[in-house]
Image (cartoon, rainbow, N blue to C red):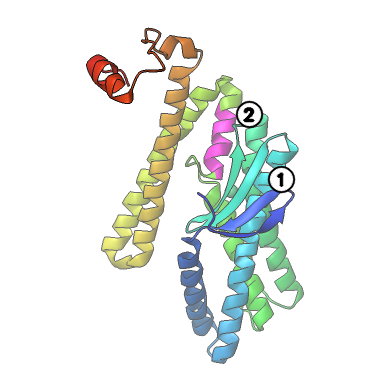
C-alpha cells in the first residue's frame, strides 16, 4: 500500500493518502450530510455541509491518531516504521520487520484501539461538558460533530478488537497465543485460521443482509470480509513460506555446475553453442 499523496512526516514517519482514500472520503462526506440533514431538520444547507466537512476531516485525523499510536509504540520498542497510509478501508502502518516478542506485538496492536477509545470517550465527554445528554439529539453544530466523532471512534475501537487477524484484535489474539505456546509461527497460523473464520462470517452476514434488503451496507460488510479473508490467507502463506525456507543456505539452492565461456566469444556463438544447447539461462 503506497501513498500517492504525501502529507508530511511525524517522528520520521511519512504520512500519506492512497488514491482509494478519495472514494471513501467522498462517501463519508455524503453520508454525513444525509445524517445531519435527518437529525437536524432546522439546519441550513450551509450548516449541514460545513458540519459534514469538519466531521469528515476530524474523523480522518482521529484515524491517523489511531495509526500513529500503533507506529509510535512500535518505534518505542525498537521497530522501524516507514509510513502511515490512509486508504479505502482505513489506515495502515508500514512497520518494518516482525515484532521480536509477544509483548511487543501485544502493545503495538492494542495501542490503536486504546487511542480510539480515549478519543471516543473524550469527544463524548466534551459534548457532555457543552450540555449534550445521551438521551437527546445534540443541539448545536459543535455538539453534533463531537457526538458523531465520539460514537464512531468507540465503534472503531470495538470493530478493530474483533479477533480477525490481521485486524488489531487478531494481532492481540496472536500475541496471547504466542505468549502461551512460545511459538511465533504457530500463533500466526492459529490467528490466521481464526481470522479466516471471522472473515467468512462477515461475508455471510453481509450477503445475508444484502439479500434481506440492506443494500449497500450489506455489500460493504461482505467486501470487508473478503478483504480480511485475503489478508488472513496471505499471512498464513507467508508463515508457511518462511518456515519452509528457514535454515536453508544459498549454497543449498544455487546451481553449482555451470559452464565457463570465453569472454572473447561472439554473442552469436554464445547463444548457438551454449545458451540454446544447454538450456541454462
Ligand atoms: Zn489499528
Observer-nearest residue: 74 or 245?
A: 245
| Residue 213 shows in the view | yes
Q: CA distance from mark 1 to mark 2?
A: 17 Å
Residue 37, percent across and down? 51, 84
Q: Nearer the viewer, mark 1 or mark 2?
A: 1
**Residue 248, disc:** none
Residue 158, percent across and down? 56, 52
- Could you say whether the residue bearing mark 1 is in a helix, strand or loop? helix
Q: Is 8 left or right of 246, judged from the image as shown? A: right
Q: Is residue 151 above or below residue 161?
A: below
Q: Residues within 10 Å of mark 2 (few under 14, many from 20)?
A: many
Observer-nearest residue: 245 or 187?
A: 245
Q: At 71% across and 45% down in the image, what residue appears?
A: 72
Q: Quadrant of the C terminus?
A: top left
Q: Is 97 left or right of 163, judged from the image as shown? A: right
- Could you say whether the residue bearing mark 2 is in a helix, strand or loop? helix
State which tag comes first along the sequence, 1 or 2: 1
Please say if the residues under marks 1 and 2 sit with CB atoms less than 8 Å apart.
no
- Name the residue carrying label 2: 102
Observer-nearest residue: 261 or 85?
A: 261
Range drawn in magenta: 168-177
Label 1 residue near ligand 1, CB within 8 Å: no
Quarter-of-image position of residue 53: bottom right
Q: At 54% across and 32% down in the image, what residue appears?
A: 174
**Residue 72, disc:** 1
Q: Which SS type dominates the magenta stretch?
A: helix
Q: Is residue 220 above or below residue 114?
A: below
Q: Residues within 10 Å of mark 1 (few under 14, many from 20)?
A: some
Q: Residue furthest top?
A: 257
| Residue 135 shows in the view | no
Q: Is residue 59 magenta?
A: no
Observer-nearest residue: 98 or 264?
A: 264
Amino acid at each position: 500500500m503506497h501513498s500517492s499523496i504525501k502529507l508530511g512526516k511525524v517522528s520520521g514517519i511519512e504520512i500519506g493518502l492512497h488514491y482509494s482514500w478519495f472514494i471513501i472520503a467522498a462517501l463519508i462526506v455524503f453520508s454525513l450530510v444525509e445524517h445531519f440533514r435527518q437529525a437536524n431538520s432546522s439546519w441550513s444547507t450551509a450548516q449541514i455541509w460545513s458540519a459534514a466537512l469538519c466531521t469528515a476531516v476530524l474523523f480522518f485525523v482521529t484515524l491517523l491518531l489511531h495509526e500513529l499510536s500503533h507506529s509510535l509504540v512500535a518505534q518505542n520498542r525498537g521497530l522501524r516504521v516507514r509510513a502511515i497510509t490512509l486508504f479505502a478501508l482505513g489506515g495502515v502502518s508500514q512497520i518494518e520487520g516482525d515484532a521480536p516478542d509477544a509483548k511487543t506485538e501485544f502493545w503495538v496492536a492494542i495501542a490503536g484501539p486504546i487511542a480510539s477509545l480515549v478519543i471516543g470517550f473524550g469527544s463524548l465527554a466534551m459534548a457532555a461538558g457543552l450540555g449534550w445528554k445521551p438521551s437527546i439529539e445534540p443541539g448545536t453544530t459543535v455538539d453534533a460533530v463531537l457526538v458523531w466523532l465520539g460514537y464512531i471512534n468507540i465503534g472503531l475501537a470495538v470493530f478493530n478488537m474483533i479477533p480477525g487477524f490481521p485486524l488489531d484484535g487478531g494481532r492481540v489474539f496472536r500475541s496471547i497465543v504466542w505468549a502461551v505456546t512460545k511459538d511465533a509461527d504457530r500463533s500466526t497460523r492459529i490467528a490466521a485460521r481464526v481470522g479466516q473464520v471471522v472473515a467468512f462470517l462477515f461475508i455471510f452476514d453481509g450477503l445475508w443482509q444484502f439479500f434481506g434488503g440492506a443494500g449497500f451496507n450489506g455489500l460493504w460488510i461482505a467486501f470487508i470480509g473478503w478483504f480480511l479473508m485475503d489478508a488472513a490467507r496471505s499471512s498464513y502463506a507467508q508463515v508457511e513460506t518462511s518456515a519452509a525456507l528457514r535454515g536453508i543456505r544459498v549454497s543449498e539452492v544455487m546451481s553449482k555446475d555451470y559452464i565457463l565461456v570465453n569472454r572473447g566469444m561472439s554473442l552469436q556463438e554464445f547463444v548457438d553453442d551454449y545458451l540454446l544447447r544447454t538450456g541454462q539461462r
